[in-house]
Amino acid sequence: MEVSKDQMSMLLENNLFESAQMLGCFLVSSPASNQEPNPYLKAEYLVLQGDVFYGGKEYRRALSAYKQALQNCKSIPRQGGNSTRTSLSATTRSPSPSSFSISTINENEVKFKVALCLSALNEHRSALFEMESIPSKARTLRMNLTMGKLYRISRNNRSASTCYKECLRQCPYVLEAITALAELGVSSKEIILLFSQTPTKIGRFSSDYQDSQRWLNRYVEAQCCIASNDYKGGLDIFAEILSRFPNNVHILLEIAKIEAIIGRSDEAIMNFEKVRMIDPCVLTYMDEYAILLKSKPDHAKLNKLVHDMLSTDPARPETLVTLSAHWERKDKRRAFSYADKSLKIDDRHVTGHIMKGNLYMSLNRPEGAVAEFKIAQDLRADIRSYQGLVRAYLALSKSKEALFTAREAMKAMQQSAKALKLVGDVHAVNSSGREKARKFYESALRLEPGFLGAALALADLHVLEGRNKEAVSLLEKYLKNWADDSLHIKIAQVFAATNMLSDALSHYQAALRINPQNEAGKKGLERLEKQMKGMDPDAPEEEEENEPEDGEGDQEDPDLV
């Protein structure tokens, strides 16, 4: 034979896809593979060539090769009940496309490879159709996990749950399946019960088995707490697991992500930084870290994070969302473009949808924001998607929809001060609802006394109703414990409104010392200085004679992509 398939297999095993692709051209065009009486050999060669294309991420070409291989298999006569194509040695091998180097063709594995190609091409329905043609008893662990993901994408949650449960019956340590089941509403007891159905080589009463089972059960409970919006319960359990597995990057990231969601920004930043000290190349949830750095703002750390992520993997959705956060202050449209690109890579990336929704709001396009926040909510509802939806509905003057969404958040997160504030925000829009708003803000502060957002909102309400002294008294109480620029700006605004200009000046200056980039602080200080000079702060400014042309201000920054 002119070309040996063993040589092709060796190239594949060493991930030499470019060489394998060139050799594959010789393999499939060899006289032996093109003989009509030998479709079986041709099918083997086509599968090998498909593996080469898959390894090189040429999914459309891989798909074509695998389908041709299956077509050739159909022309091979069956040999009784036990076909050589479904031998035991074939079914027990890993279904990874790059590891197919067996002497008999397992059609179920080739179908799975077809499904993987279709999924990579975002043709999820076709991928699911291909997976469903594989008999349930022939599905491997990876097949069940892939099928669960495809069912979730198609919103068939019941079938997804069945697949994930089967994964845990095969192996209880598939943590992806545990998280997915928790998000699908399966109770911790039901998930833990699946572990007892798993065959194990270690005796169930041995100390090793019981020890590993203990932390795994707690991990299940933590994920179920998070999925049901019991963030405090989830954090407590993760902290307990972390005490047993110090410097566990996965657990640290889970803790940091939750802290970011619930507004514990300083703690979240500290944990993200700890993760980066342990593993500087980690990308998981780093877009969440980027958004926190943007809000601080800490531009030096954000720039460093962007460069590190670009050098690690510029095509990951987390990297693109981080780029979006980096550009938001300088160029919102460019930031929007990066957020959009992140979703083209992974349209189920929740942070990408939240980022894009917030950018729609800053570009005064609330209709687009509603769509993005709804998608984020469908994928994984947390307080940020509810907050975004409420803001967008209020911008569209859809008070009923805003109130319905805020109440939904309150029902879903019964012990959340942020959800209570959200309902208050909707009531505060109309003068007739201000008393209700006040009660919700006060309830939020009773539940979480350190919740600065509720304190600022209540202060705004006091000002609207002419209770400036109460507003100042409330804000000064928080100022004792909080060095926050937004707090200083709010006090400065109240003082400026009551003509206490020198007090207002000191607070604007304090705010800008904390955050020199705070736009509200800059504009407030500029306005205040005009007032102190006896000028009308609302008078239009005279245009300068040598104002640059419009096009000159739109030059693109050369740094960072």
Image: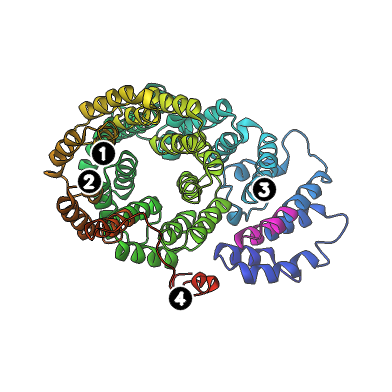
Residue 238: which quarter of the image?
top left
Magenta stretch, residue numbers:
50-64
Q: How many numbered marks, from 0 up?
A: 4
User: 10 Å neighbourhood of mark 2: few (<14), some, or many (≥20)?
Assistant: many
Using the image, tell me which numbered label, if any, was put on residue 330: none
Residue that appears at 24% across and 34% down: 236
Of residue 59 and residue 21, the one placed in the foreground of this image is: 59
Pick whichever of labels 2 and 1 is earlier in the sequence: 1
User: 10 Å neighbourhood of mark 4: few (<14), some, or many (≥20)?
Assistant: few
| Distance of label 3 from label 4 (alpha carbons) | 60 Å
Using the image, tell me which numbered label, if any, was put on residue 118: 3
Amino acid on which disc 3 is placed: Leu
Using the image, tell me which numbered label, if any, was put on residue 545: 4
Q: Which structural element holds mark 4?
A: loop
Q: Is residue 435 left or right of residue 402?
A: left
| Distance of label 1 from label 3 (alpha carbons) | 50 Å
Amino acid on which disc 1 is placed: Leu
| Distance of label 2 from label 3 (alpha carbons) | 52 Å
Using the image, tell me which numbered label, if any, was put on residue 487: 2
Of residue 213 and residue 451, the one placed in the foreground of this image is: 451
Pointers 2 and 1 in contact (C-beta within 8 Å) = yes
From the top left corner, tell me how far across and down residue 393 is, in percent: 49, 34
Pick whichever of labels 2 and 3 is earlier in the sequence: 3
From the top left corner, tell me how far across and down residue 409 is, in percent: 40, 27
Pick whichever of labels 4 and 2 is earlier in the sequence: 2
Residue 137: which quarter of the image?
top right
Of residue 89 and residue 554, the one placed in the foreground of this image is: 554
Using the image, tell me which numbered label, if any, was put on residue 456: 1
| Distance of label 4 from label 1 (alpha carbons) | 42 Å
Pick whichever of labels 1 and 3 is earlier in the sequence: 3
Q: Which structural element holds mark 3?
A: helix
